[in-house]
Amino acid sequence: MSTITVQFDNSANSPENNPPGSKLWIGGSDVHGAPGTLVDKIDTLQPYTMDASVTSLNTWYYDGFEWNSGVQLNGPFTNNQVIVLLKVKL
């Protein structure tokens, strides 16, 4: 199995850019499915290692009360790619 590491940039959802800010869960098959990762609302370069054959990633955002389905990230993804996460509309 070959892996790659991407970096998630969640600066569009920081408290300053999108009050009160939103953290995102990325990857996995459900809201907290393995092998996903939590990207905090203050993360600018959150690393995530995944199988190189992955071509899409599910996302969920936290609105302060519950997890909601977000946009799907589509690849192909490349090693060391910075993926800028879209601003969540709360």
Image (cartoon, rainbow, N blue to C red):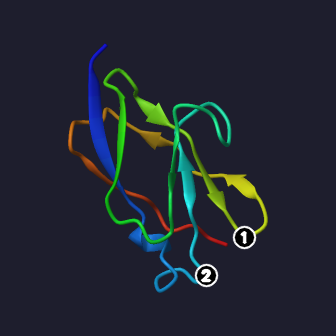
As displayed, is residue 66 above or below residue 90? above
58 left or right of 68 in image: left
> Label 2: how many residues lie within 10 Å, few (<14), some (14-19) or many (20+)?
few
Q: Which residue is mark 1?
A: 64
| Residue at horizontal 31 percent and vertical 32 percent from the top | 76
Q: Which mark is residue 5?
A: none
Cα separation, mark 1 vs mark 2, equals 9 Å
Camera-side residue of 29 and 75: 29
First in sequence: mark 1 vs mark 2? 2
| Residue at horizontal 58 percent and vertical 69 percent from the top | 22
In contact (CB < 8 Å): disc 1 and disc 2: yes
- Helix, strand, or loop for circle 2? loop
As displayed, is residue 85 above or below residue 47? below
33 left or right of 40 in image: right
Q: Position of residue 5 (x, y in %)?
A: 28, 38
| Residue at horizontal 56 percent and vertical 63 percent from the top | 23
Q: Position of residue 52 (x, y in %)?
A: 31, 24
| Residue at horizontal 52 percent and vertical 32 percent from the top | 35
Point out the image quarter for the N terminus: top left
Q: Residue furthest right?
A: 65
Specify the amino acid type for callout 1: Gly
